Amino acid sequence: MYLYEKKEMKETSFDSVKLREVASNFATGVTVVSTHTPEGDIHGMTANSFLSVSLNPPLVLFSVKKENQLAQWLEIEKLIGISILTEEMQSISNHFAKIELMSNPPQFKLEQGAPVLHNTAAWYCTKIHEIISAGDHFLVLCLVLNLDSNPNTKPLIYQKGYKKLG
């Protein structure tokens, strides 16, 4: 077993614009992370900071800015849906990124209680396992409860703007 010691991070003056510019060179898929609010509504956000962490147990992780509205509803054991968008879903990505709202909100289905978008490239039904504070973000580690994919689709890619696979 590996043990680690959490070290205190010191704030540094760093060009955040340059950091974002450099990070934009890394191509990622685009997801929508969604959950139920305490009132029962579905709330989602676009996230390209998503990764598979472990096969046993099955764990995935996403990152959310602490000031994002979704962050206020995160808690251990909370059900979270993660939808991997197809290349036709750029407008849905923009909707949940609050860049351009759609006149008709996208449709969700419930998978074991977690809201996932219809007709995606893939989806995960997860339960929050751990929330880690990391600078101005939370890293949200989730246990996968169920998942599925549609092999007849191509994922939406983001790298200095939206891209489609050739």
Image (cartoon, rainbow, N blue to C red):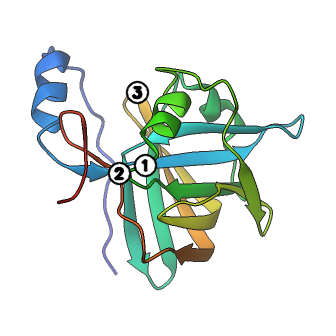
Left or right, residue 4 beside residue 147: left
Q: Can residue 142 be seen in this view?
A: yes
Residue 71 is situated, as x and y percent measured from the top left of the image, at 60, 33
* SS under mark 2: loop
Are the two marked residues, 2 and 3, in contact with CB atoms closer than 8 angstroms?
Answer: no
Q: Position of residue 72 (x, y in %)?
A: 67, 31
What residue is at 58 percent from the left and 75 percent from the top?
147
- The image position of residue 25, as x and y in percent, is 11, 40
Q: Which of 162 and 34 is in front in this view?
A: 162
Identify the mark nearer the N-term, 3 or 1.
Answer: 1
Q: How far apart are marks 2 and 1 (CA)?
A: 7 Å
Query: Is residue 14 at all visible to an observer of this figure?
Result: no
> What is the number of the mark on residue 136?
3
Q: Are marks 3 and 1 in contact (CB under 8 Å)?
A: no
Horizontal side, residue 107 vs residue 5: left or right = right
Local crowd size for mark 2, using a 10 Å CA cut-off: few (<14), some (14–19), many (≥20): many
Residue position for label 2: 156
In this image, 33 relative to 156: left or right?
Answer: right
